[in-house]
Amino acid sequence: MQVPRKILMGGGPTNVHPRILSAQSLPMLGYFQEPLLAIMDEIQDGLRYLMQTESRYICLLGASGHAGMEAGIANLLEPGEKIVIINQGVWGWKAAQMARRYRGDVVEVCKEPGVACTLEELEELLATHKPAVLFICQGESSTGTLNDLSGLGQACHQHNTLLLVDAVCSIAGSPLFTDAWDIDCLYAGAQKCLSAPPGATPFMMSERAIHKLQNRRQPVACYLFDMELNGRYWNWWQERSVHNTGLITNWYAMREALAIVADEGLAAVWQRHSDMHHMLWQGLGQLGLQPLVKDPAHRLPCVNAIQVPPGVDARAVIDYAMKTYSLEIATGLPPLNTAIWRIGLLGYNAAPHNVALVTTAFREALQEQGYA
Ligand SMILES: Cc1ncc(COP(=O)(O)O)c(C=O)c1O
């Protein structure tokens, strides 16, 4: 099998770190073998550091980031209960679709693309609706928008609401403090700022979320991601049993990804994403390009949304970058489609030489179209 090499600078996946690629080819182990259980323990320690939490209810789910969304909604929400969903793009929209399938009473709050939420407006929503669950993305990758979550968990708990956060894109790319921000359920992505292959989704629950799970009136409708059953394999209840076969080689990959983050240090990883984001906008700004997100404090460093100037063919720029440099740049997702480009600065690829290449590709592609 031959697979061409590309430089992946879209919304994810990103190129996999070589250390992680080789970790994936290590020998297979059986369900309960000591070395595998030790690796699982180390993964949990690494995830606690990554998410900045002490929670023992932490694990990997066996599927891409959607698994976290499905598990979060299915376990936290009972049929008929109210859930407020902040829709700032595709991922909030999908969460609302999913919550309706779990028969939640969904209040979908749609924001203008590229506009973040304020704590005051979220507090008002909580006071009005008193939902069982509030869903929000820390980083909405379809529009490159970053929400500030500090104080939100405390506000949720005043109304007996559980806070469910999507950090698929933002994990390791922006500061995140699960315990200090009182987040009840958090899920992340492997293939973005962790530079791992897709497939193993980091997932965490607080004591409050576990209490809700253990006192449900009805069983969790999603059998695969019933966290009572998943938690048994991850030693949540002091006694191990297998629910489904682990994605064992993906676990090796995640173990290595977490070690790479720890080697560099979380604060340094966040800083590198921020530095590359500023370098990118310096270059794009010189070309006259504008960000979709107006407020610099709410620009997601790891996925950058760029407005396509009037008269420019967005698709031709993407094709130029791919043809000339094997460089992937992404379009927007519906409904923005070719109204924006998206540049990912994700993990291993968040490096100066890649940022310089992206800027060069834009300059040349725009010149080819006669854009001044
Ligand atoms: C913010 C966010 N949430 C959820 C997802 C879904 O993750 P996956 O495609 O890995 O299932 C993505 C993927 O891009 C994302 O960026």
Image (tube, rainbow, N blue to C red):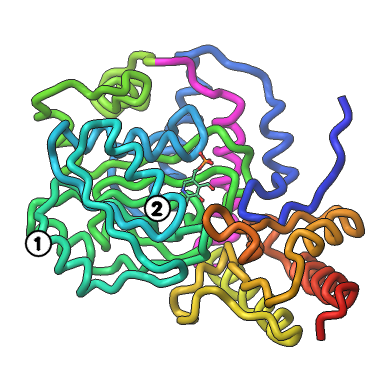
Q: Quadrant of the C terminus?
A: bottom right
In the image shown, does 313 or 227 lie closer to the viewer?
313
The secondary structure that most of the magenta stretch takes on is helix
Q: Residue at x 55, y 38 (%)?
A: 255
Residue tagged 1: 128
Amino acid identity at mark 1: Thr
Q: Give the Cα separation between the discs numbered 2 and 1.
A: 30 Å
x then y, percent, for residue 7: 79, 53
Tag on residue 51?
2
Residue 9: image quadrant is: bottom right
Amino acid identity at mark 2: Met
x then y, percent, for residue 195: 63, 48
| Side (left or right) of 187 relative to 218 | right
Residue 353: image quadrant is: bottom right
x then y, percent, for residue 180: 26, 62
The answer to whether residue 342 is above or below residue 246 is: below
**Dot 2, how many residues are within 10 Å of its Cα: few (below 14), some (14-19), or many (20+)?**
many
**Dot 1, how many residues are within 10 Å of its Cα: few (below 14), some (14-19), or many (20+)?**
few
Q: Residue at x 45, y 60 (%)?
A: 139
Q: Residue at x 48, y 14 (%)?
A: 31
Residue 370 is inside the magenta segment:
no
